[in-house]
Each structure stands twice: as structure tokens, then as C-alpha cells.
Image (cartoon, grey):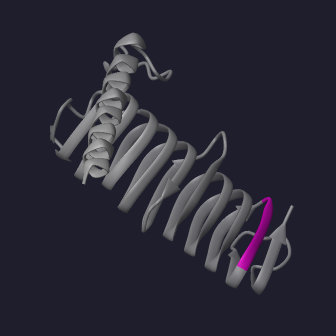
Amino acid sequence: MNRRRIATVGWLIAGCTFAATAAELGRSKPQIVNNIKPGGASNPTTGLQLALFAPVQMFPPRYDVSGFRLSLLYGRNQNLRGFDLGAVNVVEGVAEGLQLGLAVNRAGSVSGAQIAAFNDAGESENGCFQMGAVNKAGEFYGCQLGLVNLADHVDGVQIGFVNVCQTMSGIQLGFANIISRSDALVFCPLFNAQF
């Protein structure tokens, strides 16, 4: 019984320390990404964001998060650098780091990883890993691992039951592989590639 109390107190102290560190990180870095609005002002930044559902969250959706965001139902922010955990995670601009969602991860641009039932990365300029039932992207650089993988252009690998893209510089492994603007095979079961 004593060990359980000590372990519980230890976890509470560790959690409070993590939250305080994340909050301090947000205060010490006023700008996390190059996201200058047309008016010339950058977004305000926080190190810790807690959301029940947007807009019911600690900081408004226009804020950037540099640290940790926990979204119980639905969280939305402008940009994120760090760790994103929740049911539905939405980043309007750039997500750098890990998005771990129960249902949905969506970002305008991703550098890092998205793991959820449905992942949507508009672009992945610096490399991305998506793992989920359905993965969707525009210009994608990295690896998609899921039942259904969809992208406009893939520079990397698609591994899944169904893999679909318009153009590719890489390989597809799956039951149905489609490169709609291929110079060679548009459809090929098990394996398809274009370089």
C-alpha cells in the first residue's frame, strides 16, 4: 500500500513538472514557426494547451503551441511544434513533431508523424510518417502505412491494402496499387513503382 502512494505522488510530481516545463517553453519562445500573417503579426504562443472541444480550450485556436497539447474531444490551433494527443487533433498550419489521435489528425503541413484512424497531411516537406486506417496527403515525402493510402504525389513508400497516388517517386506495396499518371503501369497488384 505504501509503494502505491509513493508511486502516485511520484507520477503527480512528474506530471506537474512536465506541465510547468511546457508552459515555460511557450513563454520563452514567442514564435515557433515562420508563420507571418498578411498583416505582419505572428501568432501568440503557448507551451501547454488543453482542449475539451474547440473553441472550449485554454487558449483560442489562433494560438501556436510549442510543447504539449491535450485535446479530449477536439482541439484546433494554428501551428504546433511538439506532442499532440487527443481524439481529434487539427492544426491549421504547420505541425512539427508527433500527432497521436484516437480518431483524426489533420494538419496543413507535417514534419514528423501522424498516428490515428484517419490522418490528413496537406504537405510533408521535411518528411512524414503516417500510420492509420486511412492516410491522405497532397505532396507527401515519407512513408504511409495503412489500409488505404491516398496522395497527390509520393516521394517515398506506400504500404497498405489499397495505395493510390497521381505521381510517384518510390514504391507501393499492397493488394491494389495505383499510380494514375504513371509512365509504365497504372495499376499493379502486390507491387508498383516509379522513379
Query: Relative to 55, does residue 131 appear above or below in the rendering?
Result: below
| Numbered disc total | 0
Residue 153 at x, y percent in the picture: 67, 57
Out of 67 and 184, give the one closest to the viewer: 67
Q: Residue at x 32, y 49 (%)?
A: 3
Out of 90 and 183, give the one closest to the viewer: 90
Q: Is residue 38 visible?
A: no
Q: Main secondary structure of the magenta part?
A: strand
Query: Which image quadrant is residue 145 in?
Result: bottom right
The N terminus lies in which quarter of the figure? Answer: bottom left
Q: Residue at x 80, y 59 (%)?
A: 169
Q: Is residue 56 visible?
A: yes
Q: Is residue 98 left or right of residue 20?
A: right
Q: Residue at x 31, y 18 (%)?
A: 44
Chain part drawn in magenta: 169-173
Membership of 170 in magenta stretch: yes
Q: Residue at x 37, y 23 (%)?
A: 21
Q: Is residue 22 left or right of residue 81?
A: left
Residue 19 at x, y percent in the picture: 31, 30
Membership of 77 in magenta stretch: no
Residue 128 at x, y percent in the picture: 62, 49
